[in-house]
């Protein structure tokens, strides 16, 4: 589990959020690559039966959500837990209809398949006890399965809970078995519930059924997904092997039970640790080899070739050789070489290799002495991608070429899976046993909402493409910009010639956009972080509006130390630029434009706006992530608009000690934002709409019970008479469905502004999908919105269009982004705090977008 | 400390748990019985007889050693139970066909995925193709798919057969299947008095023979079907009771090489009475596809390594020119005291072959040089074959004598 958490945290850290300076990569990647290789199968199929029985004794017949049937993996699928939160029934205005009507209808193909069940389909859940009680889950299963009463019946059993398709005759069935030891064991099977097919518990059973089916199709399970090892894609220059596969699930959608499938890839490394070490040796030479080795390898997860288990490398023991002996469990001494020869018929080629050391986690949580495993590098495959690999542009490009499937390519793979399921005899048999019928791929009708006009100072601009309007607005003046009179440039001695031309360029683009830039004070320093800080301390006074640091290397320590100092100790907006960026031939104008825009924002300027029909509306974005250094700290970013045009923002960030990603400081933040609004607008906003990002699977209920009340009470407290109306919307960047548009006999990504609010949505939620990003390569990922609280009573149409408008307002990118701007701002802020500064930024900066 | 031991421990626990639940399988019940026996000893007398390693493992190890020694290509285990023996055998490089047969289908099914190829089997394929198949069927039924085997094992099987089946058994195994070697193990009843209050070791045993009974039966069978037989066993008796013999007695039957019988290859006609429960084919370098992957992977990664070396040399040269003195610290390395990777790159053979070269921005590696790499040589018979295997995936120069790649990756326009 910790591995999973680590991966997620890293995933956030490494994701290029939206295009920004220095990374003009215009495809916010819809990658479905599971680049984190951390959850390769571990054969820990065992889960404590005692735990289960306890859970069940308390809450056998409580609601669906209480039941946690564990599959063989022992993992609860958390997304099913969310389904228990029925928020729609509390929202009167969408109880009957949650669909909008504006826009042009568009026919979309989905990655969802109908799964037909007989009308009266039910699942019977039984609780099974053994007298005397049996510890072993295997034995429990074996005893139960050996009874003829259950032969040839569709059943799923985890050792305690039994699901049957056909009801047993009696409510309580008693069976008796004899073990080989001659003990008589009584088995009591008690009916606890009858479940309709829409129950989340059934989805878990369906998942188990499909797991069987995919195995029948010769797929290989790794983590939650299924891969086809016989059709690998090799990327030999990086020693990578990609297995194509599918992630599948079954769930209740708006009107029917649907099977969803998406194409994914498993990245495997066809390189053993020994090969990696040998390579490293050639690169580093002897002197620094051991350190380099430890630096690269410690903490990595390796997969053993002979038994398919994963281990974390905790240490390398250079003093042990394969020729050394160890003690087997029976006490006999044997050398590693002989052991692997005898056991696995493997001959080790290098008898000088050291051994890898892995601390084994104790299965039971008693703190007995930690056991260690010695692993032979030659027999261990590396897994996952190192951070070095992830930052390797060429490697990631090679990966993307394979994994970013076009809509058509994706559809072909889906069609093949459906075909395989329908044609395979065993698969069909399995489905029939459970009364399921695998139907056709679902199409639905979405709507393309009208595109927005971009409001500049004196002009209204209808961009050629909503994805990027930088060209369209080049000649327009921005809404407002303070003039920059007193500022500093700190750089090292070598960069001088660049700076002159850059500065001229900056002033030129500045004046054309209406941003007046005076000459700065130039300070030249030695090339080290301390020198930069000293210069800042020396030269920054109360009048300095902005400090620009021109850095010659991409080193994080430079950036971190400058940002840390400038955002809390000495709160002045700062702009870091890499020399390399300034050196780009022929790019100077666009680089300068982007920097000028960022600088404007950091000084509190406004770039553009869109038409917002609602007057007196405050929009808020919240994101939560874990601090990169201290995993016990959560960073809560909160960004609220403070004017009616939604062009000025109040940004705050709080660090809280917690283990979950649930915020408990929202009251302070919300009241702070409302005060600020009052200060500027002399009243409170009539409506508040909160977009909450960074919510994990299974957290929905906590959010409803814990975060929404915080927001409600702060709204209520800040006004004595009529309080502001509030909506809370959960934003998910990852979701199950994919949509393809049929056009000219091929499939394409649906256009920007496509909304889907039927069929692929959930019956118990007020939810919709919106496509607000362009995928130049691959298939677009829709963004999923779930309105969990709403007393604004806006029509779904308006809610959808407002959300789309807000995706236009991220000032770091002149184009649409995949989530509403306040969320992206909050994300950017939490990212800066979590990765670089690790403390709360000064409130003096809260009125500007200082973190862009 | 060793992961396999842990795994073994877990397996044992599971096996014990499971075996007690399934009457009617051939051999595994026996194990359960032994564990009872072992436990009894621990509890009652605590010192007298304790097999270490456990007896079932000794039996498996016996078969494993035999496979090591004779390197059979086709092996079948009749009464394979939970397929533990097959799992142990599947690692042997000599094997091409591994078959398990049991009458308990449910049990075969539950463990079937244990015999599937692992991730590692795909990443580093075997030399020879191995197919593992599990059949639901009985040792007294004839199925032509089991003809022509090198070794058939019947571990703790015959004592579960009633007299009728026992009479059919030799006809099927020796007369019909007629493999080059048969291994049969069965309890030695002379050992039983050493166990407290045990008459038969398992309630499903129809009989337990003493050494004389088993050997008489075995010799008769061997004579009838032209085999020679040798007797041994596992499970040494305790000191003082040596005269009872091994706890498990084993007969190894070898077919006498009769010229005609050997020449006539068994025809694959007729009876397929067994039901296939599971089958998996392991990827191997014998399969064109995997050989090609292996060759391409090796060639490309070597080409890129060579290119990197070249670029680094050039860079070093640059730096040196720049820093005018050649005070390179790298030359005075201390001899490695710990780990020195085996250098496969610059073998003497390879040095004789034409070197990689650069023309403009293109880096060429002659196929001849690549062919001198031991791994490539192992996979390809000749340069022509190398060329055919890589032609689809890499760029060759016009006369097809060298692999071409750009010396620099295309500009990464970040």
Image (tube, rainbow, N blue to C red):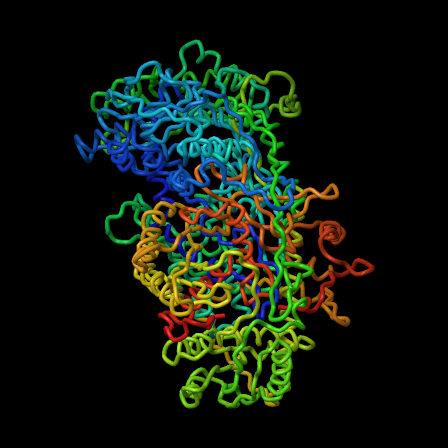
Of A43 and A61, nearer the camera is: A61
Find residue A678 and report its horizontal and vertical position in percent.
38, 66
Q: Is residue B144 left or right of residue A208?
A: right
> Which quadrant would residue A469 be assigned to in this image?
bottom right
Where A85 sits versus A583, above or below? Answer: above
Of B44 and A80, nearer the camera is: A80
Q: How many marks?
A: 0
Q: Is residue A62 left or right of residue B216?
A: left
Find residue A60 and report its horizontal and vertical position in percent.
28, 30
Where A402 sits versus B306, above or below? Answer: above
Find residue A819 and report its horizontal and vertical position in percent.
52, 56
Q: Is residue A747 left or right of residue B224?
A: right
Where B342 sits versus A124, above or below? Answer: below
Q: Residue furthest right?
A: B399
Q: Residue at image x 71%, y 53%?
A: B393
Q: Is residue A396 left or right of residue A326?
A: right
Q: Residue furthest top?
A: B164
Q: Residue furthest left?
A: B44
Image quarter (top left, top right, bottom left or bottom right) of the C terminus of chain B: bottom right
Of B233 and A13, nearer the camera is: A13
Q: Residue furthest front?
A: A721
Find residue B110 and report its horizontal and vertical position in percent.
43, 29
Of B135 and A657, nearer the camera is: A657
Can residue A483 be seen here? The reply is yes
Can residue B375 be seen here? The reply is no
């Amino acid at each position: 589990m910790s591995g999973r958490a680590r991966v997620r945290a890293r995933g956030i850290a490494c994701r290029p959020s939206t295009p920004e300076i220095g990374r003009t990569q215009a495809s916010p990647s819809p990658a479905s690559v599971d680049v984190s290789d951390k959850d390769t199968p571990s054969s820990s199929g065992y889960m404590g039966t005692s735990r289960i029985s306890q859970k069940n004794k308390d809450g056998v017949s409580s609601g669906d959500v209480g039941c946690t049937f564990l599959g063989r993996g022992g993992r609860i699928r958390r997304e099913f837990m969310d389904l228990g939160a029925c928020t729609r029934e509390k929202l009167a205005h969408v109880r009957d209809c949650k669909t909008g009507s504006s826009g042009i209808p568009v026919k979309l193909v989905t990655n969802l398949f109908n799964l037909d069940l007989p009308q009266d389909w039910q699942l019977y859940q039984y609780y099974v006890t053994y007298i005397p009680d049996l510890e072993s889950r295997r034995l429990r299963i074996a005893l139960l399965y050996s009874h003829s009463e259950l032969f040839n019946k569709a059943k799923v059993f985890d050792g305690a809970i039994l699901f049957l398709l056909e009801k047993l005759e009696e409510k309580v069935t008693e069976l008796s078995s004899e073990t080989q030891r001659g003990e008589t064991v009584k088995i009591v099977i008690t009916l606890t519930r009858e479940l309709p097919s829409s129950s989340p518990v059934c989805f878990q059973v369906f998942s188990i059924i499909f797991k069987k089916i995919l195995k029948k199709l010769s797929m290989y399970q790794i983590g939650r997904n299924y891969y086809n090892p016989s059709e690998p894609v090799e990327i030999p220059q990086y020693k990578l092997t990609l297995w194509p596969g599918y992630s599948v699930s079954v769930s209740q959608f708006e009107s029917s039970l649907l099977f969803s499938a998406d194409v994914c890839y498993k990245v495997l490394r066809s390189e053993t640790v020994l090969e990696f070490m040998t390579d490293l040796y050639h690169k580093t030479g002897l002197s620094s080899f051991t350190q380099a080795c430890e630096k690269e390898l410690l903490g990595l997860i390796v997969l053993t070739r002979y038994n398919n288990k994963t281990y974390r490398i905790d240490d390398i023991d250079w003093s042990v050789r394969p020729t050394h002996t160890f003690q087997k469990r029976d006490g006999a001494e044997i050398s590693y070489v002989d052991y692997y020869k005898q056991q696995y018929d493997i001959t080790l080629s290098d008898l000088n290799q050291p051994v890898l050391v892995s601390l084994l986690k104790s299965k039971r949580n008693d703190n007995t002495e930690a056991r260690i495993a010695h692993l032979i590098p030659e027999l261990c495959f590396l897994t996952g991608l190192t951070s070095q690999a992830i930052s390797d542009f060429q490697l990631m490009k090679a990966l993307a070429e394979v994994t970013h499937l076009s809509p058509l390519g994706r559809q072909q793979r889906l069609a093949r899976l459906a075909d395989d399921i329908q044609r395979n005899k065993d698969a069909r048999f399995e489905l029939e046993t459970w009364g399921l019928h695998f139907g056709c791929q679902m199409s639905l009708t979405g709507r393309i909402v009208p595109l927005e006009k971009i409001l500049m100072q004196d002009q209204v601009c209808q961009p050629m493409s909503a994805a990027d309007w930088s060209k369209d607005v080049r000649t327009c003046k921005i809404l407002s910009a303070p003039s920059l009179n007193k500022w500093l440039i700190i750089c090292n001695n070598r960069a001088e010639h660049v700076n002159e031309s850059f500065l001229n360029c900056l002033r030129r683009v500045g004046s054309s956009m209406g941003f007046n830039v005076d000459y700065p004070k130039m300070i030249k320093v030695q090339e080290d972080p301390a020198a930069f800080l000293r210069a800042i301390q020396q030269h920054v006074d109360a009048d300095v509006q902005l400090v620009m640091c021109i850095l010659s290397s991409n080193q994080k320590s430079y950036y971190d130390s400058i940002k840390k100092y400038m955002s809390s100790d000495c709160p002045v907006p700062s702009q870091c630029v890499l020399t390399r960026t300034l050196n780009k031939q022929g790019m100077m104008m666009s680089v300068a434009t982007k920097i000028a825009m960022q600088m404007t924002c950091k000084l509190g300027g406004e770039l553009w706006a869109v038409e917002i029909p609602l007057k007196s509306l405050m929009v808020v974005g919240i994101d939560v992530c874990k601090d990169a250094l201290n995993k016990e700290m959560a960073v809560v970013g909160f960004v609220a608009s403070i004017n009616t045009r939604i062009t000025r923002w109040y940004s705050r960030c709080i660090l809280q000690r917690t283990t979950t990603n649930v915020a408990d400081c929202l009251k302070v933040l919300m009241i702070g934002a409302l005060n600020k609004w009052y200060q500027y607008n002399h009243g409170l906003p009539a409506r508040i709409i909160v977009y909450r990002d960074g919510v994990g699977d299974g957290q929905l209920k906590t959010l409803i019970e814990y975060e929404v009340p915080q927001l409600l009470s702060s709204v209520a407290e800040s006004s004595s008479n009529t309080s502001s109306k509030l909506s809370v919307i959960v934003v998910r960047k990852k979701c199950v469905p994919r949509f393809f548009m049929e056009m000219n006999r091929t499939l394409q990504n649906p256009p920007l502004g496509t909304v889907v609010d039927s069929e692929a949505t959930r019956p118990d939620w007020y939810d919709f999908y919106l496509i607000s990003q362009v995928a130049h390569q691959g298939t677009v990922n829709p963004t999923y919105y779930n309105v969990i609280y709403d007393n604004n009573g806006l029509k779904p149409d308006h809610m959808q269009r407002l959300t789309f408008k807000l995706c236009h307002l991220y000032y770091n990118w002149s184009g649409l982004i995949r989530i509403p701007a306040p969320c992206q701002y909050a994300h950017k802020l939490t990212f800066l705090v979590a990765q670089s500064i690790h403390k709360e930024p000064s409130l003096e900066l809260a009125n500007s977008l200082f973190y862009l | 400390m060793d992961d396999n031991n842990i795994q073994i421990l877990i397996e044992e626990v599971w096996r014990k748990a499971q075996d007690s639940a399934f009457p009617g399988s051939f051999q595994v019940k026996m194990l359960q019985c032994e564990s009872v026996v072992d436990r009894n000893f621990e509890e009652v007398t605590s010192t007298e007889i304790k097999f270490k390693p456990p007896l079932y493992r000794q039996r498996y190890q016996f078969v494993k050693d035999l496979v090591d020694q004779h390197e059979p290509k086709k092996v079948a285990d009749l009464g394979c139970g939970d397929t533990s023996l097959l799992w142990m055998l599947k690692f042997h490089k000599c094997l091409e066909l591994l078959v398990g047969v049991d009458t308990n289908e449910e049990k075969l099914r539950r463990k079937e995925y244990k015999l599937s190829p692992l991730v590692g089997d795909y990443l580093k394929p075997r030399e020879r193709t191995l197919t593992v198949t599990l059949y639901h069927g009985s040792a007294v039924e004839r199925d032509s798919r089991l003809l022509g085997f090198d070794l058939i094992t019947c571990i703790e099987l015959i004592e579960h057969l009633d007299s009728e089946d026992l009479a059919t058994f030799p006809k099927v195994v020796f007369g019909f299947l007629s493999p080059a070697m048969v291994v049969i193990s069965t309890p030695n009843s002379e050992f039983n008095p050493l166990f407290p209050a045990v008459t038969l070791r398992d309630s499903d045993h129809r009989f337990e023979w003493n050494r004389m009974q088993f050997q008489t039966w075995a010799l008769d069978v061997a004579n009838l079907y032209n085999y020679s037989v040798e007797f041994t066993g596992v499970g040494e008796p305790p000191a003082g009771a040596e005269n009872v013999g091994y706890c498990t007695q084993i007969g190894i039957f070898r077919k006498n090489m009769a010229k005609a019988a050997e020449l006539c290859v068994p025809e694959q006609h007729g009876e397929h009475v067994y039901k296939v429960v599971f089958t998996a084919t392991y990827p191997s370098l014998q399969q064109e596809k995997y050989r090609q992957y292996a060759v391409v992977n090796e060639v490309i990664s070597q080409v890129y390594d060579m290119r990197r070396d070249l670029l680094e040399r050039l860079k070093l040269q640059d730096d040196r020119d720049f820093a005018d003195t050649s005070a390179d610290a790298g030359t005075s390395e201390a001899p490695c005291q710990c780990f020195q990777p085996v250098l496969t790159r610059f073998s003497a053979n390879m040095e004789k072959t034409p070197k990689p070269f650069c023309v403009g921005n293109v880096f060429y590696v002659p196929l001849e040089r690549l062919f001198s790499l031991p791994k490539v040589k192992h996979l390809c018979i000749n340069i022509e074959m190398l060329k055919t295997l890589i032609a689809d995936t890499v760029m060759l120069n016009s006369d097809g004598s060298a692999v071409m790649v750009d010396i620099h990756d295309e500009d990464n326009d970040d």
